[in-house]
Image: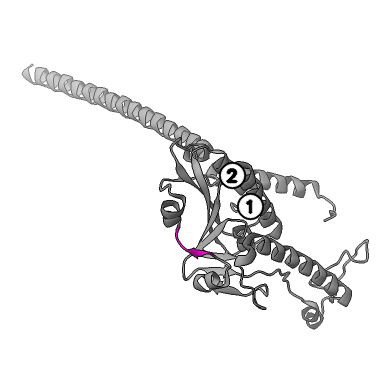
Amino acid sequence: MENEVTLNAKTIHWEREAIEKLLLADVRERRAARRWRIVRSLLWMLLFGALIWLLFSDALLTSTPATPHTAMVAIKGEIADEAEASAEFVLPALRSAMEDKGAQALVLLINSPGGSPVQAGLISDEIHRLRALHKKPVYAVVEETAASAAYYIASAADKIYVDKASIVGSIGVLINGFGFVDTLDKLGIERRLLTAGENKGFLDPFSPQSEAHKQHAQTMLEQIHRQFIDVVKKGRGERLKETPEMFSGLFWTGEQSVALGLADDFGSLDSVARDVVKAEKLVDYTNKKNLAERFAKRFGAAMGEGAVKALQVAPSVR
C-alpha cells in the first residue's frame, strides 16, 4: 500500500512538472511571438521612414534659410542626358538657387571631364538668363577638372577660380569610333547592311568610310567647335590671352589657365564664399538622383525592355 501511494505521488509530481513545462514553453512562445511582432513593426516603421526620406530627401536638403548665404550647385561627372550633370537636373537647381532671396551669389562647383555640347549649351544659356533676371553674380570653382563641355559651362560664369593643379580647357569637339572592315575580311565575315537612304549607314564601323561622309562629319565638328569658341570668347572677353593652341583641344594646369586668361584666380569653394561673396554660409542646391528614382527608372526600363522582347518589335528608325 505504501509503495502504491509513493508511486501515485511520483506520478502526480511528474504530471505536474510536465504541465508546468508545457505552460512555461507556451509562455516563452507567446513572449517570443510578441517580441517578433514588435521587431517586425519596428522594421516596417524603419523601412517606411527610409522610403519617405528617399522620396523627399532632395527637398529637405535643399530647403534654405532666410539668412544670407552662398548658393552652390555641383556639376560633377559626365555631362550627358540623364546623368546628374545633365540639364534635366542642373537647370532646376540653378533656378532654385538664384530665386532664393537669401542667396547672395551662385557658385558652380565643377569637377567634370566634359560631355555633351547640347547639355552644356542648355546649362550655359540658362546661367546667362538667370544672372540677367536676378542680378546676382555667378562664379565657377574648378576642383580637379573643367574640360571640354565642363569649361563650356564654366565660361558662362562672371569669374572662374581654380587650384594651381586643376586641369582646364580642352576647347575642342570630337567624334570617335572604330573601323572593323579589314577585321571582317580576315575573318571571312560578310557585312550585310540594308538601308533606305544612301547615307543612312553614315559612320557605320563595319563599312568603308567614304570621303563624303568624312567631310560631312568634319563640317559638323567644325561648326560645333566654332559655337564653343564663340561661347568662350563671349564669356571671357578681353581677359583671354589668345594663342594658336588655345582652341586646339589642348588643356592646361590651373596655374597656366590663369596666365592665359582662361581662369581668373586661385580659390576654393570655401574661400570664394568667404572672401568673394562675403557670405560664408554655404547651401547646396544640387539636384541629385535619389535611390527611389534610380530604382523606379531601372525597374521601368527593365519592364519596357521585357515588353519589347515579348512583342518582337521590328527595326526602328533612328
Could you say where residue 145 lies in the image, as x and y percent from the top left? 54, 65
User: Is 144 in front, or is 246?
Assistant: 246
- Quarter of the N terminus within the rendering: top left
Q: Position of residue 227 (x, y in %)?
A: 74, 63
Kindly identify which residue carries mark 1: 86
The residue most toward the bottom is: 186
Disc 2 designates what residue? 135
Residue 267 magenta: yes
Up-down: is 183 above or below 51?
below
306 with respect to 277 (left or right): right
Q: Main secondary structure of the magenta part?
A: loop
- Which secondary structure lies at badge 1? loop
Q: Residue at x 65, y 47 (%)?
A: 88
Give residue 203's position: percent from left, percent from top.
81, 69
* Amino acid type, mark 1: Ser
Task: Indicate the quadrant containing the C terminus: top left, top right, bottom left or bottom right.
Answer: bottom right
Q: In this view of the protein, can residue 166 be seen by the observer?
A: yes
Amino acid type at mark 2: Lys
Q: Within the image, what quadrant is residue 173 found in?
A: bottom right
Q: Which residues are magenta?
A: 264-268
Determine the residue located farthest toward the front in the rendered image. Answer: 238
Specify whether residue 306 is painted magenta. no
Specify whether 299 is left or right of 20. right
Please state which of the two labelled residues, at mark 2 or mark 1, is closer to the viewer: 2
Along the polypeptide, which appears first: circle 2 or circle 1? 1
Residue 198 versus residue 257: which sits nearer the camera? 257
Color theme of the render? one colour
Q: CA distance from mark 2 to mark 1?
A: 24 Å
